[in-house]
Image: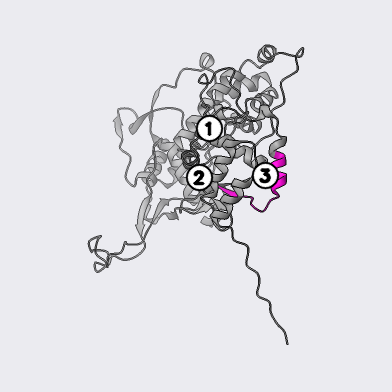
Amino acid sequence: MTTFREKRRARRIASDEAHAWARSLQLGNPNAKSVLRALALYVDGEACCFVGIDQLAEDSDLSADTVRRRLVWLEEIGAIARTPQWIDASGRRNGKGRGKRTSDLIRLLCTADADEIEARAAGRKTEDISTAISPSSLQGLNPDDEIVGPRLALGQPSQSCEGLISEPEPEPPPLPPSGGEDVASLVESEPEHFAPAWQSWRGHEVMRRDLGLAEFRKLSPDKQRLCRAAIPLFFAVQDKLRRTLVPNFHLWVRAGGFEEFPDARLGEARPPPPPKRFVHGDELAGAQVAYLVAMRRHLPTVRHPEHGNGFWFIGAPQPDQTALARFAGEDPESWLVVDEGTPQFAAWRDRLQLWLNREIEPERVYTEAFDPAVHGLPALDRNFRLRRSKLVFRVPAPWPPRRDGTWPVENEENAG
């Protein structure tokens, strides 16, 4: 006769158990312990929580900057583990980078060896531990002699980090001993364009300057100048697309992000803005198709005595928008429908925002017939029910054209 043993369920950790564990740890860091005890109030049965910086700061009576640094410290000594999280277009939380950045998943390592955690906490150098209660992230607000920890940000951003990404990184190298190279000589040896480039990078106050300088030094003088000139253009594109996530400066430099703007020029070498020109012909036809996709109505035009209908525009022609001229005159009702949440929807939305320099509102399509018995009732009626719908774009091709005006192979395959 065969017997089956019931599978043992995973151990659940209650909030009071997590709080008792946090209280029992001897960390030698009152601020960190206050943050850890505040985290214990929000854990679920797996010792995990999604609480944000602002709430932790309120619960522990500390500044947001202090909470950020103490979370980094707690992770380094093995008391917590953090996983970055995002919210996708459907409102689902995920750890795969889809959607908008949100609070980290923070897990209290209650089952870890408490002696090892305390040993790592005690083994940290005193100069690595901040003695400041509420240092500001803005320069010039703290005295020069105040000892502040080297880190100013979370290893990953939370809902109160204003979209900054600042992952945990190695400790900075110690200052040279007396008799060695002094700070003044280090500053003098910096590349000419590093300081203005660093100051113009959003959120640099909470990033590692030494890492940025190390990556910047690897560039040739021409690329250093291009990197500095490309930063305003990079953030202009981010603003157009309404993106709030800001990469670390050193990672952006390392990846060569500035090379996406080969025509970037510094203020003194920047060419004058292009003159106003009249858009007509195929460029006008492409713009009209883009306007139909985005606004679902025809683009208003004016009459030019020489070129006919069109509109005035400041800027260079956009080959990808002009490529849409092949669909001019088609009935939008016969176009493809791409649903919100699909890669095609996101690609068209981002491209339309670049073309029109405005936020794009997709079309709402109802997926069920109107029933007055439930949909026509007052909203407070117990039988009232919202009519099912979805947000879509009606587009002439599955994917938008490339920036050079050519079309992806997938479009031709789907057309065939």
Which structural element holds mark 3? loop
Chain-order first, disc 1 or disc 3: 1
Packing grade of label 3 (10 A; few <14, some 14-19, many >=20) is some
Residue named by callout 3 = 78
Check disc 3 and give the amino acid type.
Gly
> Is 343 located above or below residue 313 in the figure?
below
Q: Answer yes or no: is residue 165 visible.
A: no
Q: Which residues are magenta?
A: 105-120
Residue 2: give x, y in percent of width and height: 72, 84
Which structural element holds mark 1? helix
Residue named by callout 2 = 102
Residue 206 on the magenta segment: no
Check disc 2 and give the amino acid type.
Thr
Residue 360: give x, y in percent of width and height: 39, 43
**Residue 65, which numbered label?**
1
Along the viewing direction, whichever of 247 and 66 lies nearer the viewer: 66
